[in-house]
Image (cartoon, grey):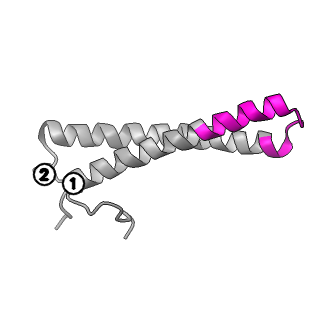
Amino acid sequence: MSQPGKHDPDLNSGPEGLAQEVVRAAAHDFNNALTTIRGRVQLLLEEGPENPSWRSDVEEIGKAARRAELVVHRLVEWARVQDGEVAGQDPTD
């Protein structure tokens, strides 16, 4: 027996189910891009030149990436709630 909302065609059919799948796919892809950005920011801050102007620009990029990660997290939480999962629940449990 499948869990509710876990790719069950009866529960995920229609516009709502499609929206959930699109949100999940977009969030996953966007999170992958953000992981690369955050990694490069960290690398540049750790190993880059000590130029205060350059450094503040890279720090701003890092802050923007963290804000974007929060948006991704909210989108994923929305999709989970739509599936009937408890907000904040770890999907690996």
Picture layout, residue 69 above or below residue 57:
below
Residue type marked 1: Asp
Q: State the mark number for residue 83.
A: 1
Q: Which residues are magenta?
A: 45-63
Residue type marked 2: Leu
Under tag 1, what secondary structure?
Answer: loop
Crowding at dot 2, Cα within 10 Å, few <14 / some 14-19 / many 20+, comes out as few
Left or right: where 46 falls relative to 9: right
Instruction: Quarter of the image for the C terminus: give it.
Output: bottom left
Percent across and percent down for residue 64 are 58, 36
Percent across and percent down for residue 47 are 85, 43
Residue placed at 42% from the left, 49% from the top? 73
Per the model, the C-alpha gap separating discs 2 and 1 is 8 Å
Q: Find disc 2 in the rendering and name its residue.
A: 11
Q: Earlier in the sequence, mark 2 or mark 1?
A: 2
Percent across and percent down for residue 68 are 50, 39
Cβ atoms at labels 2 and 1 below 8 Å apart: yes
Left or right: where 43 falls relative to 68: right
